[in-house]
Amino acid sequence: MKTYILLTLLWGIGTGICLAKDDLAWKTGKLQLNNGVELVGSLNYNWKAEVLQLKLPDGTIKAYSPSQVQSFMYFDEHANDLRRFASVDFPVRRSMYRPVFLETVTTGTMTVYRRLRHTKEPLRLSSTASYGNDDQLVKDYDNFTYLVYSNDTFRLLDDFMYDIWPQMQAEFGTELKTFVKVRALDTDDTESRLLLITHYNQLKEAAANRNITPDQADSVTGISVE
């Protein structure tokens, strides 16, 4: 029975069968398909089912899976922010990847993605609309799993202190320590870690623009701490 339900859902995604309901939270945005085609309309991202729905101006509704979409974005009035998502080949098992939608937090040498924590409860097809609105969930950083992508590898932001932070300090120790002090950051805090990675990316870009090596960057004046 479970296999039948899963196959039915996948077939619905592949053929564009609509999962939409009138009470879904539609947001104005655009998506880019894998073939480069851009579509503009009202979007609803069902994060549990991994389905992106597009409502066109003529009222037509189409559904897309991560294997069909390259990226999408929409303005979230609740969060007062432009949210960007990408379809990413994510390692679900050793040497096994599948495309999933991940929200882009910051880009650069270290690109950070996040994904709402998926509980182990089964997907209830009778109430898929309940997963098409994350207005309350997005308020809390702890509702997300954060993933740091660099050198073709994903690492958990939870491993920041012993896996990510030492690498950053080895390259820009002085600048980052100053940044922590000026901002009074707590390196155990998710928001502080994201700010540090964003600043690290800025330092990497500045060093590249100056055509210098990272170990020389600490001695270069003019790299501002914002």
Image (tube, rainbow, N blue to C red):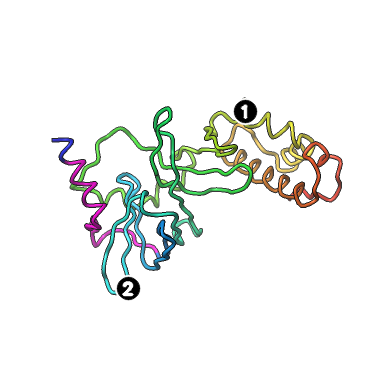
Quarter occupied by the N terminus = top left
**What type is the residue that disc 1 sits on?**
Met
In-front residue for pair 75/92: 92
Q: Is residue 7 magenta?
A: yes
Residue in view at x 18 percent, y 47 percent: 126
Q: Residues within 10 Å of mark 2 (few under 14, many from 20)?
A: few
Which disc, if any, is residue 89?
A: none
Which quadrant of the figure has residue 60?
A: bottom left
Q: Measured from the top left, where is residue 146 in percent x and y?
A: 50, 38
In-front residue for pair 91/134: 91
Disc 1, SS: helix
| Residue at the extreme top | 162
In this picture, residue 170 sits left or right of residue 63: right
Q: CA distance from mark 2 to mark 1?
A: 48 Å
Q: Which residue is mark 2?
A: 57
Q: Measured from the top left, where is residue 37 in percent x and y?
A: 41, 64
Q: Measured from the top left, where is residue 104 in percent x and y?
A: 51, 49
Discs 2/1, front:
2
Q: Which residue is mark 1?
A: 161
Residue in view at x 24 percent, y 62 percent: 22
Which quadrant of the figure has residue 71?
A: bottom left
Q: Measured from the top left, where is residue 19 in percent x and y?
A: 23, 55
Q: What is the magenta range? A: 5-27
Q: Is residue 56 magenta?
A: no
| Residue at the extreme left | 1
Which quadrant of the figure has residue 5?
A: top left
